[in-house]
Image (cartoon, helix red, strand yellow):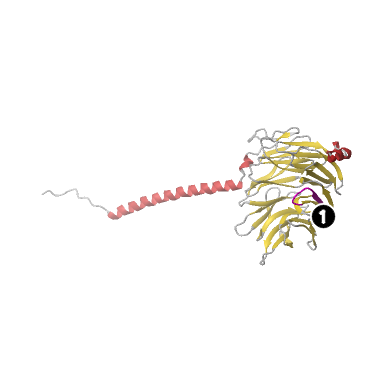
């Protein structure tokens, strides 16, 4: 029998240690890969929320290269709107703002457009100040502040936007959803820096700045224990970062709020107009003559359009800041309205009518039946239809010709 000279000895302990080291290395590699993927995902979410992709496509009026071509071709009236859907027309300075489902344009009376950009918002909402305007995506996250020359600030919120307001000096405010409250109200300066964040346990419907941007009125709705609905106005002092006080209106659903030049607050509800003094010590109710159809705010008054179910006639009310009301009956339905300090413009089934600040008729103009929105700025009257935006000069329509057109 041969003896085995090459006897092999196995170190079981060393073998186990080797396997543990290999397993630890593999585990470390998997952890590192997971961390890299997690950081990439978090970074993607951050940049998506922090930066509006539409901003990357924004084209400054003075820029030499175009990132995304605009659809509306401008230069003279009428402006063709065949490639877009017009949404809103608002007076701005001596011209008008045109909001479509794709773009926003600042248009001068001569047809020139100093600012035009693609907004890429699903549900765009426009709010206007004296020298600037705010556009935000209701139910979305994007927003941007603009003036006649171009963009001031743009970005994205971390929660969906419910409402917003444009200040008259340099501020703007956004109402957003909040996981712990019904809503949060954040005030920003023109550079996008947060000045104030206020949390509400009530559903916030609308917000509005005072003329000096010092105060912010917040309109909210709540239900008491007995089921009664209450419209509430909160007044916030932005400089002191505190609430000044609040005022309640029972059995009313808030629609919109506005702060007049003298500090008095108007609250449009479903059944009346609430008028609150600047110090919140006095409040009034201006009842509607019929069902509320439309409303408009100016710095010194609120325009109310009321009519019955048939809408064969309309009651036009102009309520001053302190609650004094001037009334006028129009023998037609009112399709749209535009309010300025020097008067009122109405789009009716018979054409366009315009009145003084005392609701004295000054003229009229027959327009196409396709026109569904009007905007008056100075002597310019802008007429929007699904296919075009046109402009006419109110001075060309005298009182005599207006009376003839109205009778016809």
According to the picture, the residue beneath numbered tag 1 turns out to be: 321
Residue 254: x %, y % from top left: 72, 57
Is residue 64 among the parts visible in the rendering?
A: yes
**Magenta span includes 314:** yes
Q: Does the magenta stretch include residue 275?
A: no
Quadrant of the rendered image containing residue 244: bottom right
Give how far across and how far down residue 403 sits, in percent. Answer: 87, 40
Q: Quadrant of the C terminus?
A: top right
Q: In this view, does 36 lie above or below 244?
A: above
Q: Where is residue 212 in the image (x, y as percent from the top left)?
A: 78, 52
Magenta segment range?
A: 308-318
Q: Please, which residue is most extreme toward the right here?
A: 400
In the rendered image, residue 405, in percent from the top left (x then y), is placed at 84, 38
Q: Which residue lies furthest to the bottom in this view?
A: 226
At 75% from the left edge and 43% from the top edge, which residue is drawn? 90
Q: Nearer the viewer, residue 6 or 65?
A: 65
Image quarter of residue 195:
bottom right
Residue 115: quarter of image: top right
Task: Please report the residue visible at 64 percent of the width from the left and 51 percent of the height from the top.
Answer: 161
Front residue of 272/189: it is 272
SS assignment at label 1: loop
Vertical position of residue 325 compared to residue 365: above or below = below
């Amino acid at each position: 029998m041969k003896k085995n000279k090459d006897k092999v000895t196995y170190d079981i302990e060393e073998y186990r240690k080797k396997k543990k080291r290999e397993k630890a290395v593999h585990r470390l590699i998997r952890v590192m890969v997971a961390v890299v993927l997690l950081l990439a995902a978090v970074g993607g979410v951050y940049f998506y929320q922090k930066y509006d992709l539409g901003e990357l496509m924004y084209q400054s009026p003075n820029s030499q290269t175009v990132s995304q071509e605009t659809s509306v071709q401008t230069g003279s009236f009428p402006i063709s709107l065949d490639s877009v859907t017009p949404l809103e027309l608002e007076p701005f300075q001596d011209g008008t703002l045109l909001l479509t489902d794709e773009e926003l344009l600042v248009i001068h009376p001569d047809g020139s457009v100093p600012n035009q950009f693609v907004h890429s918002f699903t549900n765009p909402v426009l709010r206007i100040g004296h020298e600037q305007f705010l556009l935000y995506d209701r139910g979305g996250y994007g927003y941007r502040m603009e003036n006649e020359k171009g963009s001031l600030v743009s970005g994205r919120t971390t929660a969906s936007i419910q409402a917003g307001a444009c200040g008259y000096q340099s501020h703007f405010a956004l109402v957003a959803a909040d996981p712990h409250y019904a809503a949060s109200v954040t005030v920003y300066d023109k550079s996008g820096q947060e000045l104030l964040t206020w949390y509400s346990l009530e559903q916030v419907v609308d917000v509005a700045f005072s003329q000096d941007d010092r105060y912010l009125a917040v309109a909210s709705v709540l239900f008491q224990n007995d089921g009664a609905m209450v419209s509430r106005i909160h007044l916030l002092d932005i400089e002191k970062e505190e609430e000044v006080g609040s005022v309640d209106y029972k059995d009313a659903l808030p629609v919109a709020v506005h702060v007049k030049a003298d500090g008095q607050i108007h609250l449009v509800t479903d059944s009346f107009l609430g008028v609150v003094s600047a110090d919140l010590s006095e409040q009034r109710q201006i009842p509607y003559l019929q069902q509320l159809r439309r409303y408009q705010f100016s710095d010194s008054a609120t325009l109310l359009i009321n009519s019955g179910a048939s809408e064969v006639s309309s009651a036009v009310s102009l309520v001053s800041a302190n609650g004094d009301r001037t009334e006028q009956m129009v023998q037609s339905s009112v399709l749209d309205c535009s309010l300025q300090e020097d008067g009122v413009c109405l789009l009716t089934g018979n054409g366009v009518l315009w009145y003084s600040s005392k609701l004295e008729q000054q003229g009229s103009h027959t327009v196409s039946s396709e026109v569904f929105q009007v905007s008056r700025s100075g002597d310019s009257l802008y007429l929007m239809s699904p296919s075009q935006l046109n402009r006419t000069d109110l001075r060309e329509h005298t009182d005599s010709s207006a009376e003839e057109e109205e009778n016809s």
